Image (spheres, grey):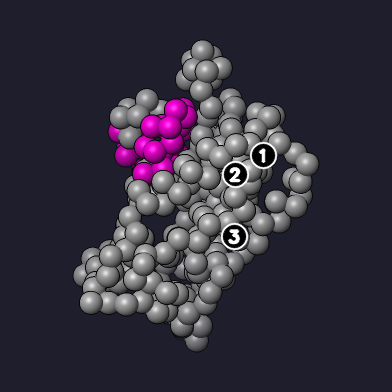
Amino acid sequence: MSSDQRVSRRTAVVTGASAGIGAATARRLAADGFHVVLGARRADRCQRIAEEVGGTALPLDVTDPESVRAFCEQVPEAHVLVNNAGGAFGLEPVARADEENWRRMWESNVLGTLRMTKALLDKLVASGDGHVVTVTSIAAHEVYDGGSGYTAAKHAQSALHRTLRGELLGQPVRFTEICPGMVETEFSVVRFAGDEDRAAAVYQGLTPLTAEDVADTIAWAVTRPSHVNIDQIVLKPRDQHSVTRAHRR
């Protein structure tokens, strides 16, 4: 990134940017004039998107403190941070909970958000108009059978994000939590360990949100006037009432 680019364009950092909501957000923010820094473990995918949108791709594993440190050291300034990296693993009831799946979910969703926000917070404040967007889920506010590990992690991630709103009150930085319902991405494929048929059944008979729908929402929030803080947005398909109730045709 050249110094001229940094002077003329606001910089947005997007984690989990190799696919799904992260990739769509990178594309949308670039279209809105941001210089986007894309981070994910699948750096080759990020590189292709970065070349497409004129952004910067850097390898990033939010579960690894050293990876977060190295990534953030290469970001000279930041105006927007989109904490999107995370995911769900497994769907076991509490009685058969897989502790390794719980660790993975807490490392990526909770500690990953903590690490990235801590590392970039000074730069976001120094920008004079910073914005932290954290992509949680409706699972951050509801619970469902078999989802204890994921809902616990998302509740914690939401609590972390909302705490920052108070701790940074009076500083030039805004905080927005995005809580999507059903979004058809790689999410369910990852959750079900690559079982594409099982993943497809999640969205059968209804029209889910797309990654672009969520990206549009994020872009709207971060392009409001700087005195406007959009605290939280919950978005679901019209066919979905709650995490456990949906209309299927």
Q: Mark 3: which secondary structure?
A: helix
Looking at the image, which residue is at 59% across and 67% down?
155
Check disc 1 and give the amino acid type. His
Q: CA distance from mark 3 to mark 1?
A: 25 Å
Dot 2 or dot 1, earlier in sequence: 2
Q: Is residue 45 magenta?
A: yes
What residue sits right under mark 3 in the picture?
157
The answer to which image quadrant residue 53 occupies is: top left
Q: Quadrant of the C terminus?
A: bottom left
Q: Nearer the viewer, residue 134 or 213?
A: 213
The answer to which image quadrant residue 242 occupies is: bottom left
Local crowd size for mark 1, using a 10 Å CA cut-off: few (<14), some (14–19), many (≥20): few
Q: Position of residue 175 (x, y in %)?
A: 63, 47
Q: CA distance from mark 2 to mark 1?
A: 14 Å
Between circles 3 and 1, the one closer to the viewer is 1
Check disc 2 and give the amino acid type. Val
Check disc 3 and give the amino acid type. Gln
Dot 3 or dot 1, earlier in sequence: 3
Looking at the image, which residue is at 56% across and 17% down?
7
- In the drawing, what numbered circle is on residue 227? 1
